[in-house]
Image: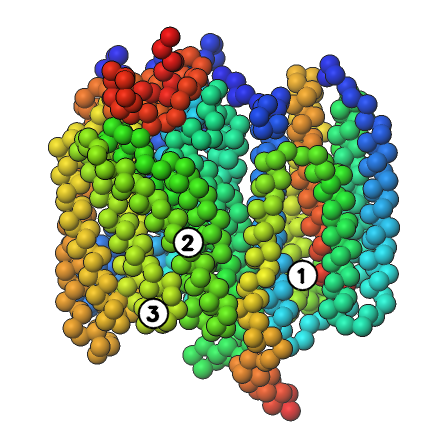
Amino acid sequence: MSDHPIDMSKSIRTYGIVGGLLLVFTVLTVAVNQIHLASIALAITVALIIACMKGSMVAAIFMHLNHEKKWIYGALILTVVFFIVLMLIPNLTVADTIGTVSPYTAAAEHAAQKAEK
Amino acid sequence: MDSTVTHSAHGHEHGDVAHHHEELGFLRKYVFSLDHKIIGIQYAITGLLFLLFGFTLMMVMRFQLAYPGHPIPLIGSIFGAANAPNGVMLPEFYNQLGAMHGTIMVFLGVVPLAVGGFGNFVMPLQIGAPDMAFPKLNMMSYWVYFCGGMTMLASFFMPGGTAQSGWTSYPPLSIVVATNGQVYWLVGMIFLITSSLLGSVNFIVTIVQLRAKGLSYMRLPFFVWAQLVTSFLLLLAFPPLEAAGILQLMDRVAGTSFFLPSGLVISGKPLTVAGGGNPLLWQHLFWFLAHPEVYVLILPAMGIISEIIANNTRKPLWGYKALVYAAVFLGFMSFIVWAHHMFMTGMGTTISAFFQTTTMIISIPSVIILTALLLSLWGASIRFTTPMLFALAFLPMFGIGGLTGLPLGLAPSDIHLHDTYYVIGHFHYVVAPGTIFALFAGVYYWFPKATGRKMNETLGKIHFWGSFIAINFVFMPMFIQGLGGMNRRMYDGGMQYAHNAGLLHWNIVIGVAAWTLGICQIPFILNFFGSIKWGALADKNPWDATTLEWSAPSPPGHGNFLTEPVVYRGPYEYSVPGHAADFTPQFEPERA
Amino acid sequence: MEIPYTVEPRPDSGLANGKLGIWLFLASEVMLFGALFSTYILLRVGAVEWPHGELNVWLGAVNTVILICSSVTMVVAWAKLKMNDFAKGRLYIIVTAVLALVFLVNKYFEYAEHFGKGEGPWHSTFFAIYFTLTGLHGLHIIGGIVVMAYLAGPGAKLWKRNPDQFTNRVEYTGLYWHFVDLVWIFLFPVLYLL
């Protein structure tokens, strides 16, 4: 038996409330998806904002990140920076060809259409 | 000390500090040991053996390059008819040797030796820790590495041979090439990456949590800082390659098209896959790791050199703070330069400019580190011991390697030099007379701590001078070949292109130099194993060094230190004015 | 020979070894799944057309609910242990593992449905990345279940010897589990909805 039990009943209540909030946000996520928004970019933005809010709650409350130590924050900030780099930069290298079709893909589609006929 | 005790390279227990623990059986003491020193030695010996094997592959390749189409003398028949009928190397076999040379040297040789070997053995001793933070994880890391290594070796025996698309394994070639060896390569990589990830967690936690009393961060030996930054690189840069490996594995065995574009036609036949994939995706994920990986290759080496220079100049290192900040900055920058390996893939000029800029910026911390180490020699009382000879050679060799990287990091010159022998010359200068010399230096330097005996100086000097001269004749001509436009990875040594005609004779020079370099390793191998049994006995601190590892017995027992280590000063208090001895160890208490 | 700071935190860092260790591991996992998300973006951005409505949104939503609940039960398990209530703590660990198993069962039905229609990973890049992302996530769920089974089973002996160390292990497992939940929180909208 541990010789210094802590009263966690307040924390447990918080966990329950946050859990409930997460379920609400999940319903929201699905609901918003049913509405066909103006553009795909807007849909992505809204979905990611809701997901980030859910994620922050899990991270801050369940994972106790709201009162963690410097080393953890440091390692995570570094990770987030490189995560963003990994998301962004490969796409920037092909940014000038987004929306265009590579001539090879076009040729392949053309050949496939001809074969179907 | 009992000189008849078995001198196994795996160390033996002296001055056991544990109060009472059951005597462990052979397997638990030497094979599945939880002791960081044993694990470090396991990594080191396995790494050294893989280095030798990887180098042997290249020595065989160099014959084909020097004398294309000629049967390989003496050993030509052992490769079998599938690889070298009548002893003449087939192009596919050449490609296999090439791909595996790179893979083995980088992932099975240098990193396990530099990080797994030296990091594991030296770092806990240098910070005054009894062991790593997670000894069981440490043991697992070694055995997962071992499994990865065995998987890689097994790939040679697959029908169709082993991986043969370069160590870079670019698709679509790596996916369509008809051999299961490529699958083994991918599985092996997954093992190796997992091993590194587990190891890096262990290293970081150990350095943060287990430093001795009085050992603040700015009193750490630079070797420890180098290992800390290296571990962060491994931790955050390796996972994308693990993901990429899984994706390529799925392309090979599950029929997916992550990297296979639509409309791909091989030998006149269109590929029957869904298509829609992107070969550049592999390149991005691969180089996202592989660029930080080269800093993983160099940082521990810089750490080793720093320790040896401080010790053999009898002076503090010049610019300790500059070294530390440069190493940290280098680590950070290494994550945002990777596409300088991809200038020829058709990216836009803006993003290309971004990568050229970051690549130029990253040369700054490297230069700061090199300059600090050079300045450390000024006014020094240099002791030309074998480790110091290798350390001194490292400096100009790394300089050449680094400088030749500059035209590669700028797109306009890279257009001419990409995929030529210039690139091979550049990176080998950094890794071979660079890192590997540093690793040799480290072996000579820490051998007494690990075994209680010193290596032979005469054999060491023969090893050094022979290697130093030969290695320059191996890699310097490659700059000439590359500037002349000779491409890399050609099994006939470039014969088929007219513009290479005037460069072909260098292949013979390089070949002879490579075989000479091979012969020059014999004194090292003899010295290494012979000294375990017959080397001059060494006490705790045979080099009169200042860092914590030299306060432990040679070799240290389980738990490392006889009394709890306390640190009173910085790591390089050599020739302190007013002190009788020319060194004041970190662990020596202040005099009253 | 004792490794210090295995249970009690080191004063200057404020951390126990395992806490730092698990967070560093999670950092590497962020990069692992990050690479797959980056793959998704690059492939989708380069695609002529991207499938929509191919996946079972309701099953995905149900699975999201299940994982969120399992996150709650996991953190409550740790809280109960901190309150010295071993029985409840162990129970909540088991509940978490059971919820995780239900998630996997749902995933099995989902996969079976797709394979039945010939929609395997080879079918298109969409299905390739769908199966890889959810498959790797599923492997992490299995890993979590294995650890939870160990903690609720043979590993529970540690509670008698060193309750604080056992509670810490549950906390670290919880951190891993919340991360697995976090990944799904992003996976679900990205794959199923967008």
The answer to whether B585 appears left or right of B74 in the picture is right
Q: Mark 2 is on which residue type? A: Ile
**Chain label for disc 3:** B
**Which mark is nearer the camera, 2 or 1?**
2
Chain name for mark 1: C
Residue at 54% across, 21% down: C4
Tell me which amino acid carries mark 1: Tyr
Color encoding of the figure: rainbow
Query: In front here: B536 or B418?
Result: B418
* Spot occupied by residue B94 in the image (x, y as percentages of width and height): 29, 62
To which residue does mark 2 refer? Answer: B362
Whole-Å distance between the Cαs marked 2 and 3?
18 Å
The residue labelled by disc 1 is C130
Residue C128, x across and y down, in percent: 63, 64
User: What kind of element bears circle 3?
Assistant: helix
Give residue B252's position: percent from left, percent from top.
Answer: 51, 63
Mark 3 residue type: Ser
